[in-house]
Image: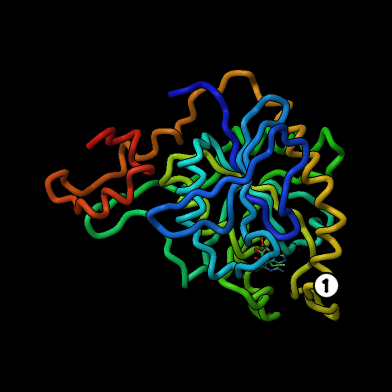
Amino acid sequence: MSSEWTIGVVGGSGVYAIDGLEDPEWIAIDTPWGAPSDELLTGRIEGVKFVFLPRHGRGHRISPSELNARANIDALKRAGCTDVISLSAIGSLQEHLPPGKFVVVDQFVDRTFARVKSFFGTGCVAHVSVADPVCPRLSAMLAAAGRAVGADIHEGATQLVMEGPQFSTRAESRLYRQWGCDVIGMTAMPEAKLAREAELPYAVVGMVTDYDSWREGEGHVEVDEVIAQLIANSGLAKQLVVEFARSLPAERTPSPIDTALDVALMTAPEKRDPALMAKLDAITARVLGGR
Ligand SMILES: CSC[C@H]1O[C@H](OP(=O)(O)O)[C@H](O)[C@@H]1O
Ligand SMILES: Nc1ncnc2[nH]cnc12
């Protein structure tokens, strides 16, 4: 495996491009799972290869519940990404995480229910672990880069991922707090699970835009509040990415996540469905080689 980094960046609400890209080029990538959210913007930052994908498409066309996360992750894999970072707008479920805070999330409670969550299935069953769903190495480097550019960083938080597109009821918002969740969003799942199946280390920088709807006697989240906060945050998020690129070690040493499929595949080789195996070409290329 190459020891070069190629960093995929999935830009969420308010982040439809990144700064500092040399030789930028939008490229179209088709996948066996359908079309990704948009073309991918490739180039180099500080000499490091980057591949940027606007999660909701340029112009924010696609709703969180209608994202084709399999196509997005597969396209990043096909584009040669070794690692993926997500920039995401999130609501806060805790007083000490006010709007403007950048939160490096390390756990999720997945409450999404209307999304396809795996590349695998009948014809090729696989079970990867998502006990530790984000890459600690990427998360630590993102937190350090954020601090270096002056972002107000909080490391370690549990994110409730909801279906959407509507925001939560007040009762739901209060319940998620009782469950011990710190922040809430609509897109990290199944993205994080699929990234693990694709053997891509993945990390999330959440940008807090609102206090959701749990605060007694206070209003509730509305999109205009989210957008205003995103406009305020997006410049800093882009600086964070440039600083992250600058801080990457010249050589990428292997991550245990690079081989997540080594212990995951269940279906006997002779029982695998050739049609599904063909769709899995990019995802299983390392573990199965040409088979
Ligand atoms: C505009 S607030 C709701 C929307 O924003 C977040 O998206 P992303 O994670 O891509 O930044 C949130 O998850 C919802 O999809
Ligand atoms: N309150 C909230 N709930 C879900 N997703 C969000 N993204 C930003 N704010 C959010």
Q: Residue at x 32, y 51 (%)?
A: 279
Q: Is mark 1 within 8 Å of ligand 1?
A: no
Residue 105 in sight in this render: no
Q: Nearer the viewer, residue 27 or 290?
A: 27
Q: Nearer the viewer, residue 51 or 178?
A: 51
Q: Quadrant of the C terminus?
A: top left
Q: 213 left or right of 53?
A: right
Is residue 175 shown above or below 1?
A: below
Q: 43 left or right of 208?
A: left
Q: Amino acid at mark 1?
A: Asp
Q: 228 left or right of 37?
A: right
> In this figure, which residue is indicated by the disc labeled 1?
224
User: x and y percent of residue 246 in the render?
Assistant: 73, 26
- Dividing the picture into quadrants, the one containing residue 4 is top right
Q: Residue at x 75, y 70 (%)?
A: 212
User: x and y percent of residue 71 in the render?
Assistant: 47, 55
Residue 80 in sight in this render: yes
Q: 284 left or right of 43?
A: left
Which residue in the rendered view is the most extreme toward the left? 270
User: x and y percent of residue 177 in the render?
Assistant: 67, 67
- Dividing the picture into quadrants, the one containing residue 178 is bottom right
User: x and y percent of residue 216 in the render?
Assistant: 81, 78
Secondary element at image label 1: helix
